[in-house]
Amino acid sequence: PRSSAGGARSELGSPSGMAKKRVGKAACKTPSKKAGGCSAPGGCCGAAKVLGALAAEGAGETPNPQLAKDLFAREFAHLNGRCYLDHAGAAPVPTSVAQQAAGELLGAGNPHSANGAGTATGARIAEARRSAAEALLGSFANRYACVFTSGATAALKLVADCFPWGEGSSFVYAADSHDSARGIGDVARSHGAAVSEIALSGSSSESRSRQARKMAYGSSGPHHLFTFPGEDNVTGAKHDIHRWVQLAKRGQLGHGAGRWYVCLDAAKLLADSPLTLHEDALPDFVALSFYKIVGAPTGLGALLVKHEALPMLARSKTYRGGGAAAAFLAAESGGSGVEAAIRDGGEAGGVRLLEDGTLPFQQIGLLRHGLRWLNSLGTPEARQMHAWRLRDDLARRLAALRHPIAPGSAVGGRALGAAPICLVYGPPAGAPPSEVGGVVAFNVLDRQGRVVSHAKVGYAAAARGIDLRWGSFCNIGGLRQALLAAHGDGAKELYDPCWKPPDALAEDGYVNGALRASFGLASRGEDVATLVEFVEAFVAAMVEPILKEAEGCDLDDADCDSTAASQETQETQETQETQETQ
């Protein structure tokens, strides 16, 4: 349902009637104990009805805030008393999934053993592979092999270590790639490959596309790799997967003959959005972490490898341990090595050569329950719309906040009111869900437009029970791009490389981070209101003293201006010291 053989498909879901029928009714018939479905108290059907209605919202019907509250009460009541706004960091674990976790610790055995427990565990792992591919790739599931890793970073490292780099190879990465994806460049460079960066948005992107010429393409010659994120984890900006995969495959992102491969970092995208692929632009590799999608298990991710690229990775891999070594040695005894393992074992043979040692079979068993729960909720478009609506609401409200206006229009010629309180980075409010995910990156500004230390704001929010993320989000390139776009000519002074300690942020006019609020299935409308109210209270604590001082000032008195400024500085320092103590 999330694929297209030709043009792009709308990511907003089906017409409302179809959405209701497919999600609201059919989903409730799927889970059952016989099929291994949700067996938690209340089952998954209640949640499915909630998300079924959310899917109808995505098709244009009137939003109902009570729906999100019902899902929260059913699955996320353990978050009561907190305002959880870090879904991009980790999705909360649903109660019904957690209740089934203990069962995976009982009766499981090493899948390399041929005994009953080992055989049963091996069957559960095979089921989890199929379920993951089907849940994430839809109709393209049969085009990919699921290689389990410890997470998205390990998946990207596997590509880096096994890609057949050589003299003449090129590695191109998007400017807003996660640090783990950028790290592939160090491995590529060590093998003599050329490494370069490309911006996927703005004038440089359009200029690069216009000037690009189609390069020779074929199986001969050096191998090249392009990696980019489906969604920037700093600002939530989404990239056109179809377009960039096509450009790369046509050789329009680099120079020289050879074959181009594409690695899509889908870790953030899949947290709240569907992965929409097209037959004529399929990435060769897709990296992901499961805890960002359904909350559990941690320490488990996957590299989805297109079947045509699987032999290439398996041949280039140099280290093989555990099951991978056994598969390789068995094939070697037949005289054909890797080729025989892949030929005789097919997809399974290639996968075994890429997975070293014993897989985390208990975590994989838990993954099955998480995926079933997720599937019971209906379409990914419904989940996407839920997160996007909250994101759009927060972006609008933060952008509208203004510092309070003091009596009179100015003090000593200095304006006191109507200055924005927040600066939102990335796509503005109103950007559609096809362009932005459930993320708002922002900084708080003082009345002069200076950035207040994101660390101080973040710690103050944490003291109020608000779970934000602040810093650079393990994405130096994405942060740099956001700051440059927002601060313009002053960006070089505002952006400070991240060697500076966190407690020194925003000193002397420098800023090297931001705050990030991100939404998901556990999010509610009141979470938006809680954060906005906190920001208003935080700023009020900073500016109230100087506004009171301004009330007694003669607007033409220069000494009054200096007095107000001195009072502002003193009160700001005292507020910061109090927040640090908290």
Image (cartoon, rainbow, N blue to C red):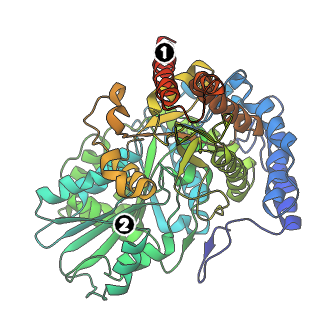
N-term mark: 1 or 2: 2
Tell me the tag on residue 75.
none
Q: What's under tag 2, amino acid-wise? A: Ala
- Say which quarter of the image contains residue 7: bottom right
Point out the image quarter for the N terminus: bottom right
Q: Residues within 10 Å of mark 1 (few under 14, many from 20)?
A: few
Instruction: Judge from the rendering whether residue 364 lies leftward or rightward of residue 167; answer left or right.
Output: right
Q: Position of residue 505 (x, y in %)?
A: 36, 32
Q: Is residue 224 above or below residue 556?
A: below
Say which residue appears at 65% left-offset and 61% top-offset. 433
What's under tag 1, amino acid-wise?
Glu
Q: Residue at x 52, y 49 (%)?
A: 126
In the rendered view, would you say 482 is above or below 89? Answer: below
The answer to whether residue 353 is seen in the rendering is no
Q: Secondary structure at mark 2?
A: loop
Q: Position of residue 183 (x, y in %)?
A: 26, 50
**Vertical side of 560 occupied by 359: above or below:** below
Graded by Cα atoms within 10 Å as few (under 14), some (14 to 19) or many (20 or more), the crowding at tag 2 reads: some
Query: Looking at the image, is mark 1 or mark 2 nearer the viewer?
Result: 1
Q: Where 193 sits versus 457, above or below? A: below
Please name the residue that numbered disc 2 is placed on: 199
Instruction: Give the structural element (helix, strand or loop) at label 1.
Output: helix
Q: From the viewer's side, name the closer residue of 101 and 559.
A: 559
In the image: residue 237, left or right of residue 372: left
- Front in this rendered view, residue 429 or 91: 429
Question: Quick check: 29 left or right of 580?
Answer: right
Q: Give coordinates of residue 125: x percent, y percent.
A: 51, 44
Per the image, the residue denoted by label 1 is 574
Give yes or no for contact between labels 1 and 2 (Cβ–Cβ under 8 Å): no
**How far is mark 1 from mark 2, CA to CA?**
42 Å
Residue 191 x/y as whole percent: 12, 60
Observer-nearest of 148 and 168: 168
